Amino acid sequence: MQILLFSILAGLGTYLAMPAFLELLKEDGALRKNYRQDSVPVGGGFLFIWIGSVMGALLGLTEPWTWIPTGLGQAARPSTLLAAAALGYGLLGLLDDLVGTRKQTGLLGHGRALLGGQLTTGAVKAAAGTALGLLLAAYRLAPGGFSEAPWADGLSAVAVDGLLIAAAANTLNLFDLRPGRAGKVFLMGYSFVLLRGNPVSLVLLPWLGSLLGYLPYDLRGEVMMGDVGSNALGSLLGLASCYALALPARLAFLVLLILLHLLAERISFTEIIENHWLLHRLDLWGRKGP
């Protein structure tokens, strides 16, 4: 019951606070051209990620979470790690929203710029995001914190999980090109975690609620969530997958995400979606205008 209450409060809080937050973004010039070349406030994800994280952290303080295996310890409660992932990757995304450019795109573009001596926000996100993912993975798998971290027998699991979290964070960013699209991808990913029957799907409810409170504004084209929102949502799915899937499945998921990144370097996901009748209908659902 407390879980639903926290989720509802997160959704209502986000929905009611969004108009004032949008005015703040407009007044301070946080605007960017969208796909229709309209100037739209960017960084709307900042609000729903913070509200979801605060509610998620409070949830972790009020619930005993007796279903957690004893070996994980109190410090590795899923709600705590999920909040750390959302805020950490959201901060990296905010850096890109504030000072990033679109001169370099994709991992290869940022990699070439780095080899040429130019540091880009994409390169910072890739390096820091990988480090953060490995940190979260090690902390989740450590039986008693870093003093007993599983370097000897769990290094492969730490590597897979860390890279999975980092790759998932950037994957949602690949889809944040049309109103509501990244949010819908998150909802589909959440449905997968829910169908797996893992209790971590319940821990995600505060972020789900805050996202649902935000989405109407995004679908109407009044705001873009920006990298601060899409990166955070992706990291939540990545970390939740680490709880919900066995190691072989996590490895397969990581390979799939890497392939998606490689495909994104060569093809347009937007063209694929617009040329497939079912994907196109789902993409247009709830949106205002084409």
Image (tube, rainbow, N blue to C red):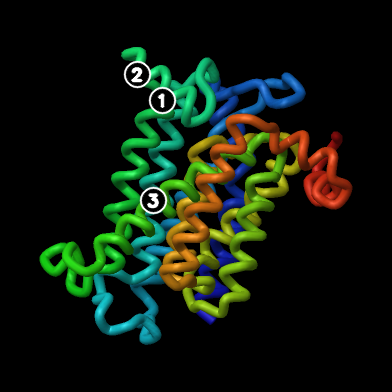
- Earlier-in-chain disc, 1 versus 3: 1
Marks 2 and 1: CB-CB under 8 Å? yes
Image position, residue 258 (x, y; %): 51, 46
Marks 2 and 3: CB-CB under 8 Å? no
Residue kind at label 1, given as amino acid type: Gly
Query: Where's the C terminus, which quadrant?
Result: top right
- Asked if residue 280 shows in the view, the reply is yes
Image position, residue 246 (x, y; %): 44, 72
| Residue to which mark 2 is pinned | 115
| Residue to which mark 3 is pinned | 163
| Residue to which mark 1 is pinned | 111
- Earlier-in-chain disc, 2 versus 3: 2
Give neighbour class at mark 1: few <14, some 14-19, many 20+ (Cα, 10 Å): some
Image position, residue 5 (x, y; %): 55, 73
Compared to residue 40, the image places residue 183 above or below, namely below
- Asked if residue 20 shows in the view, the reply is no
User: In percent of the image, x 66 and y 21: which residue is there?
Assistant: 33
In 3D space, how far apart are the residues under numbered discs 2 and 3 (Cα atoms)? 22 Å
Compared to residue 145, the image places residue 255 above or below, namely above
In this picture, residue 273 sits left or right of residue 11: right
SS at circle 2: helix
SS at circle 3: helix
Query: Where's the N terminus, which quadrant?
Result: bottom right
Residue 192: image quadrant is: bottom right
